[in-house]
Amino acid sequence: MKRFKLSVLYNVVTITLFWFIWQLNLQPVKAAAPITHIVVAYQLAPELGVEGEEEKKLFLLGTSLPDIRYLRQVKREDTHPEHVTWQMVLDEKNPVKKGMLLHALLDKKRDAYLLEKEWYTSLPDRHRVNTVKLAEDCLLYNCITMDEWRKIQTAFDEKALQQQVLQQAQLPNLDEEQLTRWCALLYRYIDGLPQEDQSIFNFAVNGMQMLLTQEPLKLNPSQTMQTVISERVESLLKLSQETVFKDYMTEFYSIGNLIRELSR
């Protein structure tokens, strides 16, 4: 019960903080959310020749790094190369850079797949980009056991690994303070996903810390922050329960199909 109360308090603080970030009116980007990137990297690590505990952690930190741009110090063009290919990911020997390349490739191929299947046009305009992201994160989270998640989570709390990422990533404008903030956000995000003592509502609120910077919020006189959150949770629940969405998840994210999509 104590943990639940702390979680609720954290969610309130998070919403207050990101209310101000929302006002920056950044445009939504059609790309995968953090858990999706981590799960894909974790499952593809053997295929990509990533071995050893430290190398895997650096790989996962690398694949999570490109979206540090949400903090608005590192630019997207420096973290998401347009012409990345599956062969480039295979050939890269540095685990941090390999993870970063996989991130950019997944964003590129996932968006192309969703556009090809006309997924975005089938969802309400105000929710379609982030609803798909949250639903993907929610469902893919269960592809990894809780014990595995706890091991993954430690990667985002190890200062020595963060120093290696800082040195190996070689990103313009990336500094230790920004990287520490980003890793702390990811640590919290992993901790806030649905578990036995947490509802989908708490997940959606907690998870928005990774997503709200991408989509402008303009409340009309009849809306409150609570009603907007409720609408998004309702959209998330509806989408995640639809057979057609579950079919998409199977079609795109099963290992064999995923490798085929990433390599074509």
Image (spheres, helix red, strand yellow):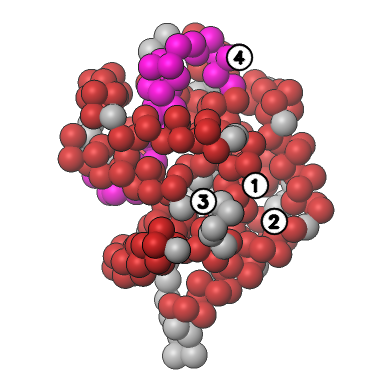
Q: Is the magenta stretch mostly helix, strand or loop?
A: helix
Q: Mark 3 points at which residue?
A: 193
Name the residue that disc number 2 marks. Answer: 240
Residue 19 as seen in the image, left or right of residue 244: left
Q: In which quarter of the image is the N terminus?
A: bottom left
Query: Closer to the observer: label 3 or label 4?
Result: 3
Mark 2 → mark 3, Cα distance in angstroms: 15 Å
CB contact under 8 Å: marks 3 and 1? no
Residue 75, disc:
none
> Bounds of the magenta span?
44-73
Residue 71 in view here: yes
The amino acid sitting under disc 1 is: Leu
Residue 141 location, x and y as percent? 58, 42
Residue 135 falls left or right of residue 74: right
Callout 2: helix, strand or loop? helix
Q: Determine if the magenta segment contains residue 47.
A: yes
Residue type at mark 2? Answer: Ser
State whether residue 196 is above or below residue 13. above
SS at mark 4?
Answer: loop
Give percent across and percent down for residue 8. 41, 66
Counting residues from the N terminus, which is met first, the one under dot 2 or under dot 4? 4
Q: Earlier in the sequence, mark 3 or mark 4?
A: 4
Which disc, if any, is residue 47?
Answer: 4
Q: Name the residue: 58% across, 14% down.
A: 46
Residue 24 shows in this picture: no
| Location of residue 260 by image quarter | top right
Is the Cβ of the residue at disc 2 closer than 8 Å to that at disc 4? no
Local crowd size for mark 3, using a 10 Å CA cut-off: few (<14), some (14–19), many (≥20): many
Q: Do the residues labelled 2 and 1 touch (CB within 8 Å)?
A: yes
Residue where numbered disc 1 is placed:
139
Give how far apart the Cα atoms at labels 3 and 4 are: 27 Å
